[in-house]
Image (cartoon, helix red, strand yellow):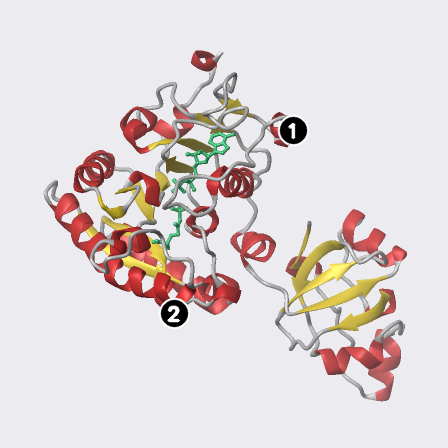
Amino acid sequence: MGSTVDRSVIRDAHRMVVKVGSSSLTGPEGGLDGFRLQALATSLAKKAMSGTQVVLVSSGAIAAGMVPLGLERRPKDLATQQAAASAGQGALMAAYTNAFTMHGVQVGQVLLTADDMHKRSHYVNASRTLERLLELEVVPIINENDTVATDEIRFGDNDRLAALVAHLVDADALVLLSDVDALYTGHPARPGSERIPLVAGAGALAEVDVSRAGSSVGTGGMQTKVAAAQMSVAEGIPVLLTNAEQVHQALLGEDVGTLFTPVGTKSPARRRWLAHASSATGRVVLDDGAVEAVVRRRTSLLPVGITRVEGRFSAGDTVDLCDQRGSVVARGLVGYDADELGPLVGRRLVRDSALRSGAPAPRPVVRRDDLVVL
Ligand SMILES: Nc1ncnc2c1ncn2[C@@H]1O[C@H](COP(=O)(O)OP(=O)(O)O)[C@@H](O)[C@H]1O
Ligand SMILES: N[C@@H](CCC(=O)OP(=O)(O)O)C(=O)O
């Protein structure tokens, strides 16, 4: 079955994001495995030299920092993780710089925080930097800026970060490299688990068990990889999941790993950001008619269809639009501050009467172009 799956979307991608996990770069006791890192860099440098734009999202800072700091196991507390990441990120970048420049390919470090994804201005700025690096034929090497992240705002695992970066740079493919060669029907160590060569739609995952933890140095296990793959394919970006040892074959489009095929089409950059990267600062609760109008007819949201406003937000912030049961049905950029919107709840604002009274013309709570249905 595997051999019938066409993996040319990976081979022919013009721009790809490759994510490598801690477990593929380090040993179980931490510390960088220079041999594995070198092998990965060689495959990616060759791909870059053949004309493909490659963005690398690399974990491994915390694991790399364990040996120099004398830590025997991956620290559990945030402060020690940050100290390890601080010591390890420099070592990680030094190793990559050596390994890539050996092949004549330049690299650039980009450290991102969750805020850089949530805040539109930061997101656009990160996108501009990455575009420029790619124009200059540099391979950006991205990691979370662990030293300044706090528990509340951390990505935590880099799988989600990689999917967001794939959206950010509008990649043609995302390659997730782990210590396991593919997604299996159950934990690979469990007798009877079988490799899944193709995932075409969420239905294919219904029977798949990803509940068991991953390696001692990684964070998310298979769950976060599958979630990242789903975020990516929802925006039309195919994903290949395999191990770092097989990256060369994977980039040639050979039958390795698990291919997740797109289930959605690419949406404009702003909508992509709204749906996946932005974070809501408030909630607006809609009556049934407004849910119908926004979700089915894709109209703008007007004050008359709102029953409640929750949270403190300013005009231009992201808010979740909820139905009467509290389920989030859409997300959008709100046109009013929370204080301004409160008194307008349920009111029918008529453009003509506003104009007659000299008041400014009423504006939608969320314009149809500024909203995504979830
Ligand atoms: N259904 C499954 N298929 C494959 N691997 C699984 C599955 N369920 C759990 N896993 C575990 O997930 C691990 C990969 O996650 P992790 O150790 O966090 O990797 P990384 O450091 O690459 O992010 C695998 O080594 C495996 O032990
Ligand atoms: N930013 C962290 C990555 C977190 C992490 O361990 O992720 P992963 O190995 O991809 O599960 C680091 O560099 O250590």
For mark 2, does the 10 Å Cα neighbourhood hold few (<14), some (14 to 19), or many (20 or more) residues? few
Horizontal and vertical percent position of residue 69: 23, 60
On the image, numbered disc 2 is attached to which residue? 148
* Quadrant of the image where one finds ligand 1: top left
Q: Amino acid at mark 1?
A: Ala
Label 1 to label 2: alpha-carbon separation: 37 Å
Residue 206 tag number: 1
Q: Quadrant of residue 129?
A: bottom left
- At a point 81% along the width and 88% down the height, the residue shown is 358
Say left or right for 368 vs 357: left
Label 2 residue SS: helix
Q: Nearer the viewer, residue 137 or 59?
A: 59
Q: Quadrant of residue 344?
A: bottom right
Q: Amino acid at mark 2?
A: Val
Direction bottom: furthest residue: 358
Say left or right for 349 vs 211: right
Q: Nearer the viewer, residue 260 or 87?
A: 87
Say left or right for 148 vs 347: left
